Amino acid sequence: MQALIDVIGALAIGGLILITMLTTLFNVQFSSQDIVRSVLLYDNVQKSCELFHSVLSTVALDMPIDSVFVRTENHRFTFFSKWNILQERLDTSPNQYDIF
């Protein structure tokens, strides 16, 4: 009878240890996935900010200050610049750009 109680106790303790180990492995896996996603998100945000900064740095480029026009609305930003963003060169007339 004593041996049967010892086997049942050892089985219960072994099961608890096994459950603890599996839970720890799942937590480590989920944490590493979160870290990978955070790094990817950070890279995407950094690239977007760099692109947005390069576009906004062209606002009113090579234009007199009295002809600068910037309009903002809900989810929209409009400005003029002589810098041609698509061809990456300076034009003689201003171009209008809308950012949504």
Image: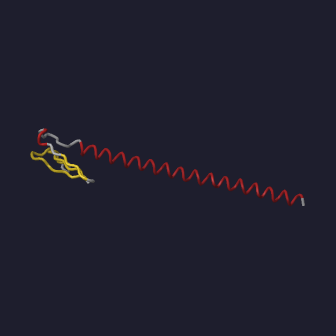
- Residue at image point 82% right, 58% down: 7
Q: Nearer the viewer, residue 9 or 39?
A: 9
Query: Left of 96 or right of it: where is 44?
Result: right
5 left or right of 47 in image: right
Q: How many numbered badges does the structure rendering display?
A: 0
Q: Quadrant of the N terminus?
A: bottom right
Q: What's the residue at 23%, 41% (across, down)?
A: 57
Q: Nearer the viewer, residue 40 or 16?
A: 16
For the point 46% across and 51% down, which residue is it? 37
- Residue at the right extreme, as displayed: 1
Q: Nearer the viewer, residue 2 or 84?
A: 2
Instruction: Residue 62: name its quadrant.
Output: top left
Q: Residue furthest front?
A: 74
Residue 47 location in percent, x, y?
34, 47
Q: Which x, y percent locates residue 51? A: 29, 46
Q: Which quadrant holds residue 54?
A: top left
Say if 65 sits above or below 39 in the image: above
Q: Position of residue 55 (x, y in %)?
A: 24, 46
Horizontal side of 30 relative to 39 (left or right) equals right
Which residue is found at the position 20% from the left and 48% from the top? 71
Q: Which corner quadrant holds the C terminus? A: bottom left
User: In the rendering, at what x and y percent does residue 11 appear?
Assistant: 78, 58
